[in-house]
Amino acid sequence: MAHKGLGQLLTEYEVAGTADYYALPPGKQSMFVSRLYSELEEHAKEGIESLKSGRGLKLHFVVKELPDEGFSNLPSDAFFRKTCFYANQTLVTFPFRDSEKSSQTVIRRGHSATVKRNKEIVSFGKYRAQRGGEVQEIGKNHHLYRAEFDTFLHLLCTAHPFLDSGYLTIVPSYQPEAKRFDIRTKARLGLHSANFRREDLRRQFEEEGYKDLVMGSGIAPYLYLPYFSDLNAEEVLKVRREEWYLYNDFQRKLADLLGGLPEQDTESKLFDLLKEIDRGVIHLVERAKEIQKSERKRDVISLIGFVSIGLCMLLSPASAAAVAALLGTGSFSAFRYIEARRETDPQKARLKEDEFYLMWRLLKPEENRI
């Protein structure tokens, strides 16, 4: 079967979370898992090749499982949106433990056989369902703990909009590609860690406290604009597509800024950049408001002028001249209206020339519409 992509697979089976997967009939579950395994293989190969040839900022996030806490650092929606914008490419590796246990046991009594499933284990690989509920493996499968498989599926669903974009690669630890990510390989690929040691930088990318910020409850940490919690994934992808020239230039600057720096210095530079972007976006918001104010004033004056001309046409020539002189509409024309518009158009054009215009585009529509 031809590969369609991880995102397309989730869409096809209508899996938006683990509950949707377990709602599938058993036969469909088996087919989904088998296709998921195949798609992940292709996804990892293509993603690694893109990382090798790609330019700009490349981030690597490692999901970690702690003995007593489980998976304590799963990325949020906002984190994926933010990394898939600030980084040209993002790599996420997920830890899996291969179990020696089987996902099922076949109990034979005489000529009959009964399949007893191990609910704690998922057979992850290529296989097909047989009659009687027995499962035939095609090649060697990975026997994964169900809790880890469920968490991994949740991760995929969270990242769903970016899975087929070419900007995000998710690699399970059992794959050969994941096992080759030593320090030298990361340096050769130009990967920077997204497991930030600076707590303030981690909060910025997770946008912790955003709800308190919006609701006005509690004391939220200051979050730098633009807020990615305001956006959906398609809006992020749209800005990357539509402003590709500006985006590529932004990535070149990021690569120059962070290239060759130690991890600690990289985080400091990145945090300072977020702070600088915040100031630049706020300045652009104010400029946009001034342009809107000028346009509203122009439109009001133009409306008065057009209405006044209409009224003058109903009066006698002598009266019309007196009214026109009083209202200042004697020389008003459509040409003057066009000229007034031309005065504000260059101001709009200069907004796009600003180095922070790209990030300003990511604000909510009511904040950046002009």
Image (cartoon, rainbow, N blue to C red):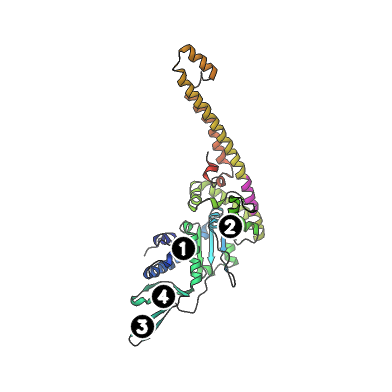
Mark 2 secondary-structure assignment: helix
Image point (37%, 70%), residue name: 27
Label 2, residues with CA under 10 Å away: few <14, some 14-19, many ≥20:
many
Report the residue marked by disc 4.
Answer: 139
Label 4: few (<14), some or many (≥20) within 10 Å?
few
The residue at which mark 1 appears reads as 17
Whether 353 is drawn above or below 150: the answer is above
For the residues marked 3 and 4, what is the alpha-carbon distance in whole angstroms? 23 Å
In this view of the protein, which residue sits in the foreground, 162 or 89? Answer: 162
Q: Are marks 1 and 3 in contact (CB under 8 Å)?
A: no
Q: Are marks 4 and 1 in contact (CB under 8 Å)?
A: no
User: How many numbered circles are shown?
Assistant: 4
**Residue type pointed to by label 1:** Gly
Q: Which mark is residue 113?
A: 3
Q: Of callouts 1 and 3, which one flags the residue occurring earlier in the amino acid sequence?
A: 1
Labels 1 and 2 touching (C-beta < 8 A): no
First in residue order: circle 3 vs circle 4 = 3
What is the spatial separation of the Cα atoms under label 1 and label 3, in whole angstroms? Answer: 34 Å
